[in-house]
DNA sequence: TCTGGGGTCCTAGGACCC
DNA sequence: TCTGGGGTCCTAGGACCC
């Protein structure tokens, strides 16, 4: 059996752990720049605040219902996630952390366990130790565990937030209940096509022929069908190094000058380099993109990306910044209002491999230099040491007007209790 | 005025090899 | 009339996830 443990309204719940006065009140969390809604408490969902909606369109509603609005506080969410995952890891030797708020546990050899009680024990411990509400679904396959989890979340009273699919009858009932667009792995495009075929539920979906699914949804769809039928096809996935790493941002205002974009791109490249070093990889290829604001009809639009093959693998801030500037020079055009840009690195090799070419050599001195830089920044705070071409005066700032404290990761933000 | 960020996998088609 | 057969690698684009 597989268990899927999912934190309810995770970001909103993290905020509420440290603000118990907000229990029962509508909360939303906004994306970077306070742009879009990325998390909602149940109360916020109930008053019809949609996921992904731009915050400026909702101001009226926020005021009307006294919605508590938070800027995204990722250090807090990351730390709370680690705490939850550490607890879950005690409940099975085989675990896959699927996302910041979800994990699969493989329950092999639990034949003589009462899984309902086991789930309840997990639920109680996470609630007691972290204050984060969770839902648990248990079933013979991952796709069915996802479905069971959905039921547990939808009917917390009836299920005690733990639901198990362990027989044919429950499986069929659940599949008939689940709308096809809510199936894990079926997105907007596929649901449209499926509905045109008169497929409206997960149950309808598994009645389709293999050949139709293969033709229209590739082997991915086929695997999903089997998993939903109860034939284990998707297994836990090993945690491995990332295959691409991105740092991208939407700017608070428009940028028109090359120098402004250059500073951002250098900072993004440095950030990618740091992430690369954290997983002991070097990249062999780098992409830079810039684009104008697609929502503005009144401005002329431009969007371009460029991929640069590096002459040698590297994870040095200095080298990546250099190549990123070269790339930017090739795509930058005067006269546009740029709103978003990013650097994405790909095609990784291990740090240990020192493949160089005959004519171009990487600078070996960067290796100890970057090591020192990481150590200093780790100790004294991010970006304490940065490249000269990066922003020195903090001109650039993200809009974060409703940021909560870093209750668990910053000494000066720890809650003080007055007795 | 204002609209997020970071990933994965698969396929088709082109370029190339012998 | 008729124009081989069997591969690999790479890339862009599309689908999906949180």
Image (cartoon, coloured by chain):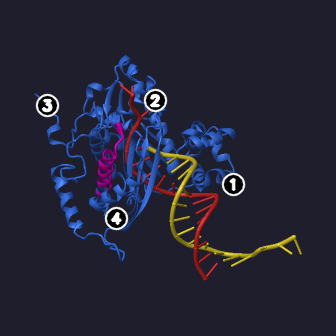
Chain colours: A blue, B red, C yellow
The answer to whether the residue labelled 3 contacts the one labelled 2, judged by CB atoms less than 8 Å apart, is no
In this view, the residue in front, A20 or A366, is: A366
Q: Nearer the viewer, mark 1 or mark 2?
A: 2
Circle on res. A282? 4
What residue do we see at 30% from left, 52% from top? Answer: A266
User: In the displayed structure, does residue A399 sit left or right of residue A293?
Assistant: left
Left or right: A195 in relation to A141: right
Counting the numbered discs, the total is 4
| Magenta stretch encompasses residue A252 | yes
Are the residues tagged 1 and 4 within 8 Å (C-beta)?
Answer: no
Q: To which residue does mark 2 refer?
A: A50
Label 3: state its secondary structure.
loop
Question: At 44% across and 55% down in the image, what residue appears?
Answer: A306
Q: Secondary structure at mark 4?
A: strand
From which residue to which does the magenta span run? A251-273
Q: Mark 4 vs mark 3: which is more N-terminal? A: 4
Q: Secondary structure at mark 2?
A: loop
**Secondary-structure class at tag 1:** helix
- Report crowding for label 2: few under 14, some 14 to 19, many 20 or more residues within 10 A (C-alpha): some
Q: Nearer the viewer, residue A364 or A149?
A: A364
Q: Are marks 4 and 3 on the same chain?
A: yes
Give the alpha-carbon distance from disc 1 to disc 2, as whole Å.
Answer: 37 Å
Q: Residue furthest top?
A: A64
The residue indicated by pointer 1 is: A211
In the rendered image, the vertical position of residue A361 relative to residue A398, given as above or below: below
Separation of disc 3 and disc 1 at Cα? 64 Å
Q: Chain of mark 4?
A: A
Q: Main secondary structure of the magenta part?
A: helix
Q: Are marks 1 and 4 on the same chain?
A: yes
Q: Which residue is mark 3?
A: A417
Q: Earlier in the sequence, mark 1 or mark 4?
A: 1
């Amino acid at each position: 059996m597989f268990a899927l443990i999912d934190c309810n309204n995770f970001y909103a719940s993290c905020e509420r752990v440290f603000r118990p006065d907000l229990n029962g009140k509508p909360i939303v969390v906004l994306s970077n720049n306070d742009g879009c809604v990325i998390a909602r408490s149940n109360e916020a969902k109930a008053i019809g605040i949609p996921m992904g909606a731009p915050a400026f369109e909702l101001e009226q509603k926020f005021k009307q219902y006294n919605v508590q609005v938070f800027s995204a506080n990722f250090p807090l969410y990351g730390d709370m996630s680690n705490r939850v995952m550490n607890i879950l890891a005690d409940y099975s030797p085989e675990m896959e952390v699927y996302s910041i708020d979800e994990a699969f546990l493989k329950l092999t050899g639990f034949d003589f366990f009462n899984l309902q009680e086991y789930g309840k024990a997990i639920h109680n411990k996470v609630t007691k130790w972290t204050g984060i509400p969770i839902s648990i679904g248990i079933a013979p396959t991952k796709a069915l565990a996802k479905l069971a989890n959905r039921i547990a979340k939808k009917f917390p009273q009836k299920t005690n937030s733990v639901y198990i699919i362990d027989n044919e009858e429950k499986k069929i009932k659940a599949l008939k209940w689940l709308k096809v667009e809510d199936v894990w792995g079926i997105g907007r495009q596929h649901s449209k096509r499926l509905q045109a075929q008169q497929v409206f539920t997960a149950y309808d979906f598994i009645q389709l022929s293999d050949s139709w699914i293969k033709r229209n949804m590739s082997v991915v769809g086929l695997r999903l069908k089997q998993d939903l039928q109860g034939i284990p096809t998707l297994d836990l996935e090993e945690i491995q190094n990332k295959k691409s790493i991105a740092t991208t941002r939407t700017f608070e205002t428009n940028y028109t000058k090359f120098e402004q974009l250059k500073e951002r791109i250098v900072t993004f490249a440095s950030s990618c380099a740091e992430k690369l070093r954290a997983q002991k990889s070097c990249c062999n290829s780098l992409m830079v993109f810039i684009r104008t604001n697609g929502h503005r009809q009144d401005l002329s639009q431009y969007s371009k990306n460029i991929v640069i093959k590096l002459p040698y693998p590297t994870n040095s801030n200095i080298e990546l910044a250099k190549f990123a500037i070269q790339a930017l020079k090739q795509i930058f055009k005067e006269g546009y209002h740029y709103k978003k840009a990013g650097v994405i690195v790909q095609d990784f090799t291990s740090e240990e491999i020192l493949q160089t070419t005959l004519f171009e050599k990487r600078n070996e001195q960067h290796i100890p230099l970057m090591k020192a830089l990481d150590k200093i920044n780790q100790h004294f705070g991010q970006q304490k040491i940065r490249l000269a071409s990066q922003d020195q005066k903090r001109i650039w700032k993200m809009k974060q007007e409703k940021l909560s404290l870093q209750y668990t990761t910053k000494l000066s933000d720890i809650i003080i209790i007055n007795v």
